Amino acid sequence: MRWQIMLMRNSTVNDRSTGQVVQGKTSCGLNIPAVLGYGVKTNLQGFLFYKSVFPSLESLSLALVANLKDDMNINADFDQRVVVDTTQLAWVDSPMAGVQRKPLDRMGEEVARATTVVRYQANAQFSRHVHDGGEEILVLSGTFSDEQGDYPEGTYIRNPPNSTHQPFSVSGCTLLVKLRQFHPEDQTSLRIDTKRADWYPGLVPGLTVMPLHQFEAVNTALVRWAPNTRFNAHVHPGGEEIFVLEGVFYDEQGRYAAGTWIRSPRFSQHKPFTKEEGALIYVKTGHVGL
């Protein structure tokens, strides 16, 4: 999905056929891209259609675990669409006792560009380390901690490049973690309690957006879909990544229950909707293949 994750005013579009990013002004006076998605009424149409074929979830689950053991390259072709039901993946032990992982994509060995579901058992901890390429975390359940504080379910965290910490969990927790996927100049450190942060209207009735982060053309948000909400077909020039947090999300290519991770390549297109279940999704756009 192409989400605009800031509430815009006085935004304009110069090229309706290509979706060229045009500068707009937010309600708080910051300049950010105005043509990035659902949260701003740009009414863009006429995008290219792109669609790719993906193998079964069962075969992918087995391949993920095998690949992790073999060469540590998992879903490393960013020109391919990938769908993973993370509830069907086996946990893989990390080098630290009590910390396990479900790899979603990965390029490299233990220090890698990676997207992973991570589980901390109660009282598990990780040794102090540096994130030379930055770290992004969404706490899916439980409470995650480091020397800076405690982060309950729903907390969104950004640790910028070259930041350091010593994480742990007293009660146990599950996280969505993205490593080494920051622009070198993106030095913003964030701690957002998404249980309390504001929601803004989306482009269609039933759609609300919570902005989390924006840097250049890369945007991150939570998007809540009321039951039976539909959106127009649209393209993702910079690709899109979704993690379904609640409910069931749909498009013309399938049904995606809570726990499903979807990565769509650059210039992919779809027409998403919900049924009676509604959905809450984490969405990142503009970053695939960078």
Image (cartoon, helix red, strand yellow):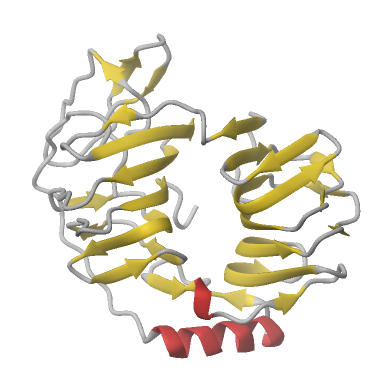
Residue beneath the point at 46% across and 57% down: 289
Residue 286 vertical placement versus 123 (above, below): above
**Furthest-top residue in view?**
29
Residue 101 coordinates in the image, percent (x, y): 68, 70
Q: Is residue 211 left or right of residue 130?
A: left
User: In this orientation, does residue 73 appear?
Assistant: yes
User: In this orientation, does residue 37 appear?
Assistant: no
Q: Is residue 39 left or right of residue 231?
A: right
Which sits in the foreground, 286 or 256? 256
How many numbered marks have been drawn onto this rendered protein structure? 0
Residue 212 coordinates in the image, percent (x, y): 49, 34
Q: Is residue 38 left or right of residue 84?
A: left
Residue beneath the point at 43% across and 32% down: 211
Residue 139 vertical placement versus 56 (above, below): above
Q: Is residue 243 left or right of residue 249?
A: right
Residue 205 coordinates in the image, percent (x, y): 16, 37
Residue 58 vertical placement versus 136 (above, below): below
